[in-house]
Amino acid sequence: MYLELVAILLTTLFVWDYLRFRRHNKMYAAAGIRGPTCYPFVGNAPMMINESPKTVFDLQFRLIAQYGKNVKIQMMGERGFMTADPKMIEAIMSSQQTIQKNNLYGLLTNWLGDGLLVSKGQKWFRRRKIITPAFHFKILEDFVEVFDQQSAIMAQQLHAKADGKTVINMFPVACLCAMDIIAETAMGVKINAQLQPDFPYVQSVKNASATLAERFMNPLQRQDALMRLFYPKVLDKLNDSVSNMHSFTNSVITERRDLLQKSLAGNAPLLNDVGQKRRMALLDVLLQSTIDGAPLSNEDIREEVDTFMFEGHDTTTSSIAFTCYLLARNPEAQALAFQEIRDVLGDDKSAPVTMQQLGELKYLECVIKESLRLFPSVPLIGRHITQDTMLAGKLIPAHSDVVILIYHAQRDPEYFPEPEKFLPERFSMERKGEINPFAYTPFSAGARNCIGQKFAMLEMKSTISKMLRHFELLPLGEEVQPVLNLILRSSTGINVGIKPRVY
């Protein structure tokens, strides 16, 4: 009797699962989107369980080779497709019907709340409108000084290892520098991460980022209930880190708001510790913003400041580290970049750099863009389709999750001849217009493109040019093994050697 009941229950569940997704399956078949065999309830999870973050890129390449650039996929109860097709990517990124992020981004709400990265609908639109002025070129111009100062600290810290023999993993080095930069530009505070890497806020950011990356990749960690059951200490550590970060951010916001109100009451400019006019931070733009005439609450502001901190350190860390790695292994490109830097910035390594000068580093920009093609900081992004939508001539059913495979699209030989080669000249002015803008989307595109991409490019130019002014980069250490994560990393480190420049 017991076995009969179990059999009836399982049969009922199988039928329910089939009926639940029958319409989805028919519509995907009609659209010509195929994929690997899906099993009841678990979908393609068994296939993914056999993969590690180090091999999932290879799996995705194999699926594309077998099923085409649009691959039907199911993970537990979520159904949709992956795409590396620039035509489909253009349709998705250009449509107002497909700007909602998928459910995985919900893992970030504990830290980021409902900030710009994860918000949707009218809230997202209003926040985007408020934050856009924070990246006005006048504000960015002031930030260049921060980029230059913090990059100089990074170079100074590295001189002790500049023997041409020591292997340096650039990821943690660039991470501390990027953290100093984003804290000072977003919040207007110095956290001195490079000089004090054990500072509690710095450790909390690192712990939270690492734990969230693991949760994205491990299905057993995607639900708090499962985390509490199988990984209670990890969840406790994450919650403690988030609590510490929120406390720090709240204290900065409160202090900054009080200073701003005193300044407005006295009709006097904000001054720093040495009596100079205080540099505008992204936080100040938020403090002075309103929605329907009402100021943003401290919680509203904290969501966006935390989002700046989250998005603004790991992404640039990845791109700076991979660019240094590629320059170390492509000496001709490094020589061209270095000569341009000397021509534009001169030979005085201590001379401050201006925004105009960074803009003149055209070849270095090509180097960074080609690095982002091969190793995009964000290798994939997710969207959720809420209603039946026609995309690139294919009718996609409602409640579909879409994964845009940026890493794979940017290595498509149809759009990038010799895709595995590092060729910065792809992005030269002479070849402008040759690259399909939706085959190359390291900053996304459309309505939800990266709001801070100009900020990021200036930061990368400043930091990498500082490295090249001080050091020759050498091809030491293991080759990279890209790992799918919140951002692109390498399981073997992103390694270089350095020796002092003599000129």
Image (cartoon, grey):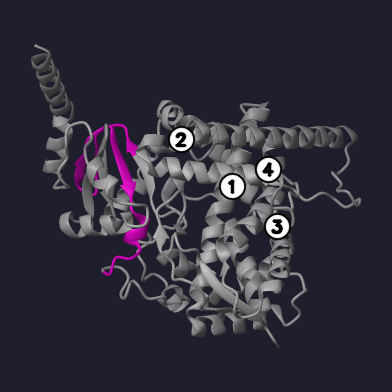
Label whose residue precedes the other's in the sequence (4 or 2): 2
Instruction: Read off the residue under disc 3.
Output: 194
- Mark 3–mark 4 Cα distance, whole angstroms, equals 13 Å
Of 50 and 154, the residue lying toward us: 50
* Label ID, residue 201: 4
Do the residues bearing badges 2 and 1 touch, measured as CB atoms within 8 Å? no
Residue type for callout 4: Tyr
Whether residue 403 can be seen here: yes
Q: Amino acid at mark 2?
A: Leu
Q: Secondary structure at mark 3?
A: loop
Q: CA distance from mark 1 to mark 3?
A: 13 Å
Q: Secondary structure at mark 2?
A: helix
Q: Position of residue 404 (x, y in %)?
A: 34, 50
The foreground one among 503 and 228 is 228
From the top left corner, tell me how far across and down residue 426 is, in percent: 41, 75
State the residue position of label 1. 206
Q: Earlier in the sequence, mark 3 or mark 4?
A: 3
Report the quarter where the N terminus lies. Answer: top left
Task: State yes or no: discs 1 and 3 in contact (Cβ < 8 Å).
Answer: no
In the picture of the structure, the residue carrying the numbered disc 2 is 107
The mark found on residue 106 in the picture is none
The magenta stretch spans residue 21: no
Could you give the CA–CA distance between mark 4 and mark 2, rounded to whole angstroms?
20 Å
Q: Magenta part of the protein: which range?
A: 384-413
How many other residues sit within 10 Å of disc 2, few (<14), some (14-19) or many (≥20)?
A: some
